[in-house]
Structures are given as C-alpha cells and as structure tokens.
Amino acid sequence: MKKSTLILPIAILLSLVVFGFQGSKDEAAKTKWIQLFNGKDLKDWTPKIRTHELGDNYANTFRVADGMMQVRYDGYTQFDKQYGHIFYKKPFSYYLLQVEYRFVGEQCPGGEGWALRNSGAMLHSQDPKTMLKDQDFPISIEAQFLGGNGKDPRTTCNLCTPGTNVVMADTLFTPHCITSKSQTYHGDQWVQANFIVLGDEEVYHLVGTDTVFSYFKPQIGGGSVNPVDPAVKIDGKLLKEGYISLQSESHPIDFRRVALVDLYGIKDNPKKLKEAVHQALTEN
C-alpha cells in the first residue's frame, strides 16, 4: 500500500523536536494553543456515560476542583460497566493535542481488572449525539493511558481501537490494543501526552517529546464497541476528523491541561506544519 506523502516531512518534523529547528520569531509566533479545558468548569464539554442519556453527568463523575478536571466515583456503589466519556464541543481534523494527566486513589468497586489505572483520550471519535444509550465506547481511536502498578512494566500512550482499525507497516491492524515503547509511570506523577493527528493520514503518540507510537489511515472497522448504530459504523470509512473525549473507566484520574494546536490551515504546507509542531512541543 502506498504510504502517505507526508511521511518523510513528518519524520523530519519529529527529529526536529529533538534536535531543534532554527525558525524566525515571526514563524514561531503563528503557533497558538487553544485551551480546551479552562481550569474553572466543564464549559464546552458534554458527558456521555453508558446507560445514561447524553449530557447526564451521573453521580458527578466528571467535575472540576483545584484547577483540574477530575474523574471520581464517590457517588457510585458499583461501577457496573458504566463507562464514561466527556466530549469537547467540536470536531477537529489536523491537530496537536496535549493532555497532562495523573492517576490517583483507588479503583471504583466493580471495575474490571484491566481497567486498573486505565483511561485514555479518544481521537477522531464519532459525534456523541450518534451514540446509543447503552453503547460502551464511542467509535474512535483510543490513545490509552496506563499507570504503573508499582512494580511491573506498563507502557502508556498505547493504541486501542474501539470500532476502528489502523494501518501499520502497510498492513491493516485488526487486534484491539497494542503497546507503545514508552517508559512506565508509577504512582501519582503527572505525565504529558502529545498526539499529532493528521486527518486520515497519520497519527503519532508522544510522551513529552519522545515518539512512542505511530500508525496510518485510521478507519472505521473491527469490534470492541457495543451496541452500535450500523448506520454510523461504516467499516472501511477513513476517519478524516472527529471529536475528542476523555475517559472514565473506573479509576480516578486528574487532567490539569487539555490543549490543542489546530493545524488544519497549514495541512498542505509541510514546512509550516513541522515548524508549528516543533515550536508547540519545545517552547510550551
């Protein structure tokens, strides 16, 4: 399969994150972070929790305290597979997303073993208005966050694919999850995750400025999402854009920064694209 024409420029881009780029101050000034989370309230965000209607923030699962968006379960008796996602108000196509997170506290009673210190950012997600009331996960590309258990290796910024597939090494990848090459982050330390999302072409997962995973041609397909409207799940359809959401999977987590650089206006200019990403990742 023919690879995207942006592979070489973006490979150069990623090397520039490490080795530096000599651009003008005028060029650098064009990069602008959009704060998706304002640190005060959940304005512009809408929750969708399994078995509940869109907009119902059951048991105050998603809340804001101390400048952080928090996911908490003190209002739950049992988790009971009430997977939740909180969606930003509008979709994006070409962008750099930055999320700073930390796992805290103890898992909610009834949470699955695999969900211990487990959350994620959903990229190119379906419109939450099209999710069924009992649907567990949105059709999306999941950038999976995992926290260490204090002793074993456990990578983060992995890839999971609820209702989707991606291409790796010219082959359609159909298993549900695959690990990255990141370090393990134990305890309640903050982790900065960055995602370079280039429409339906390429996606890169970074921890800080270290690239830990990449893939191509995100598209609808596969399983691991149930139930789902067949009119929405059109297998083989490339994901050119979508919504961003953050997960609630039974373990408390804090998000202190959710910010984005919109790259759509320069998507056809590799030089400006790499300049913008480099500046955002190295000077933020």
Image (cartoon, rainbow, N blue to C red):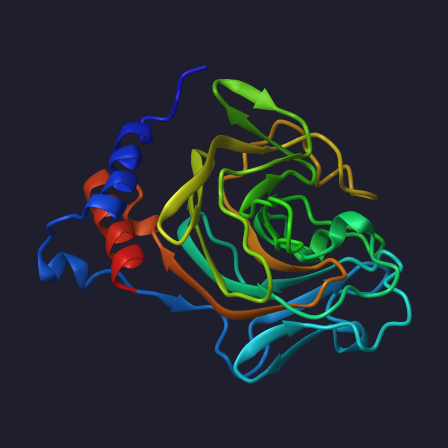
Q: How many marks?
A: 0
Task: Write the residue at 11% across / 61% down.
Answer: 26
Q: Quadrant of the N terminus?
A: top left
Q: Is residue 200 visible?
A: yes
Q: Residue 21, percent across and down?
A: 16, 48
Q: Nearer the viewer, residue 242 or 150?
A: 150
Q: Can the viewer see residue 199 in this picture? A: no
Q: What residue is shown at x 73% (from left), y 55% (from top)?
A: 116
Determine the residue positioned at 45% across, 47% down: 93
- Residue drawn at x 48%, y 18% as measured from the top left: 170
Location of residue 260 (image quadrant): bottom left
Provide residue 10's location: percent of width, then percent of height. Answer: 30, 36
Quadrant for residue 35, please give it. Answer: bottom left
Q: Position of residue 83 (x, y in %)?
A: 78, 57
Q: Is residue 267 above or below residue 170?
A: below
Seen as rendered, the residue at the extreme top is: 1
Q: Nearer the viewer, residue 107 or 270?
A: 107
Residue 254 lies left or right of residue 107; in this view the side is: left
Q: Quadrant of residue 128?
A: bottom right
Instruction: Estimate the x, y position of residue 176 in percent, counting from the top left.
Output: 69, 34
- Toward the front, the furthest residue is 151
Image check: 159 left or right of 270? Answer: right
> Front-most of 127 and 83?
83
Q: Quadrant of the C terminus?
A: bottom left
